[in-house]
Image: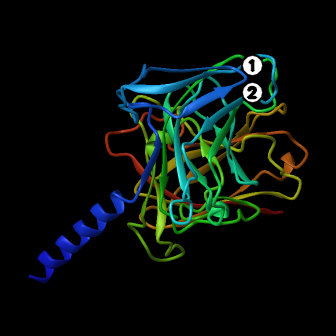
Amino acid sequence: MKKVIFTISSLFIFVAFAFTQVTIEDFEGTPLTWSGDGTFAVVDNPTTDGLNASAKCGSYTKSGSHAYSLLLGTLSGPLDLSTNNELHMMINAPVDTKVIFKLEGGGDALEVTKTIASTNVWKDYVFDMSGAKNFTGIDKIVIFFDPGVETSDDTYLFDNIIAYPEGPCAGTTPVDGIVDDFECQRNVEYGAGWDALTAIANPHSGGINTSAMVGQYNDPEGEPWLPLVADFGGPMDLSTRNILKVKLWSSMAVPMLFKLEGGVSPAKEVWQDITTTGEWVEYTIDFSDQAAANHEKLSIFFNGGVDAGPNDVYYIDDIVFEEA
C-alpha cells in the first residue's frame, strides 16, 4: 500500500508541476506581436522528426545591415517571473554563433547570452532569468541572433518559448575552470555528440566520485571519429588554467583522444589510454604548452578511432581546467 500511495503522490506532483509551466509563444495560435530590423514570419516547421514536432515555428531573417539585428516580441501584459523564471526557447540555427535573450519593460531589463554550437537541428536552450524575479513590468522579449555580425542575413528558426518554475540551479555563478560537473556548473554548450550525452543519476557512486549527477555518453555506432565537442563560444583562456582534469568510468580498456581546436592556432591532440575499468578514475591531460594558443573547442573522442559496439557506454564527470 505504501508503494501505491507513493506512486500516486509522485504522479500528482509530476502532473501539478507540468501544469505550472507557462507557454509564452508556440506559434500554433495567435502569435505575439513580433517586429524587428529583419524579416519575421510564422512558417511550417521544416524538421518535425526531432526534438520539435510542432507544425509551426517562428522564422527570423537578419537584416544584413545591423550588427545587432533586433527581433522584438511584445506581450499583451506583464510577465509574472516571481516563480516561473527559467525560460526555454528552441532554436534551429544555420551557423555556429551566439544568441542574446533579453527581457525588458517597466524600466527593468535582464539579458542572457548562450552559445549556439549545433546547426540545422532543433535544440532547447535554457535561460536563467531568476535575476528578474522581482521585475513586475516585463512585457517585451528581445532576441539578437548572431549578435555583433553586421553583414549576416541568415535565417533562424525559433519556437516554444516557455517559462518553467525556478530550478535548483537558479542564480548559479560559473566557477572559473569548471567546464561541466553535470549538476549546476554546466558552463559550455555541446556541438557534435550533444545528442549522445545525457546527465543522469550517478550509477556507480563511490570511490573518488560520489556526485549525484554525471554524464552518460553513448558512443554512436559507425562513427569511429565522432567526438563530443564542448564549445566555449570564443577563445579559451589557457594562460594559467591549462591542465585538464576529467573523471571517467569505463567498462572497457580503450584509447581516448583529447583535442583543443576551433581557434586560429593549430589543433593540439593528447592521447590517454583508459586502462582501469569498472571504477571512477581521474585523468590529467597536460595542455600547458597551449598557454598562449587560441582555441575555442575541447573535443573528446571516446574509444578514438574504433567503431563503437551496440553497448559502448561511458560515464564522465567533473571536467575542469586547473592551474599548472
Tag 2: amino acid: Ser
Q: Nearer the viewer, residue 198 or 305?
A: 198
- Seen at 86% across and 48% down, the residue is 289
Taking 16 as reference, is 235 above or below it? above
Q: Give the left or right position of residue 181, taking residue 320 as reference.
A: left
Q: Secondary structure beneath disc 2?
A: loop
Tag 1: amino acid: Ser
| Residue of label 1 | 152
- Seen at 62% across and 50% down, the residue is 272
The image quadrant of residue 52 is: top left
Name the residue furthest bottom: 2
Q: Give the left or right position of residue 18, taking residue 103 as reference.
A: left
Q: Nearer the viewer, residue 136 or 88?
A: 136
Q: Count the marks: how many? A: 2
Q: Nearer the viewer, mark 1 or mark 2?
A: 2
Position of the C terminus by quadrant? bottom right
Classed neighbour count for the residue bearing mark 1: other residues with Cα under 10 Å, few (<14), some (14–19), many (≥20)? some
Asked whether disc 1 touches disc 2, contact meaning CB atoms under 8 Å apart, the reply is yes
The image quadrant of residue 205 is: bottom left
The location of residue 236, given as percent across then percent down, is 80, 46
Q: Give the left or right position of residue 212, taking residue 236 as reference.
A: left
The location of residue 240, given as percent across then percent down, is 87, 59
Q: Secondary structure beneath disc 1?
A: loop
Name the residue furthest front: 77
Taking 72 as reference, is 254 above or below it? below
Q: CA distance from mark 1 to mark 2?
A: 9 Å
Q: Nearer the viewer, residue 322 or 38?
A: 38
| Residue of label 2 | 69
The location of residue 283, given as percent across then percent down, is 63, 61
Name the residue furthest left: 1
Residue 259 disc label: none
Dot placed on the residue nearer the N-terminal end, 1 or 2: 2
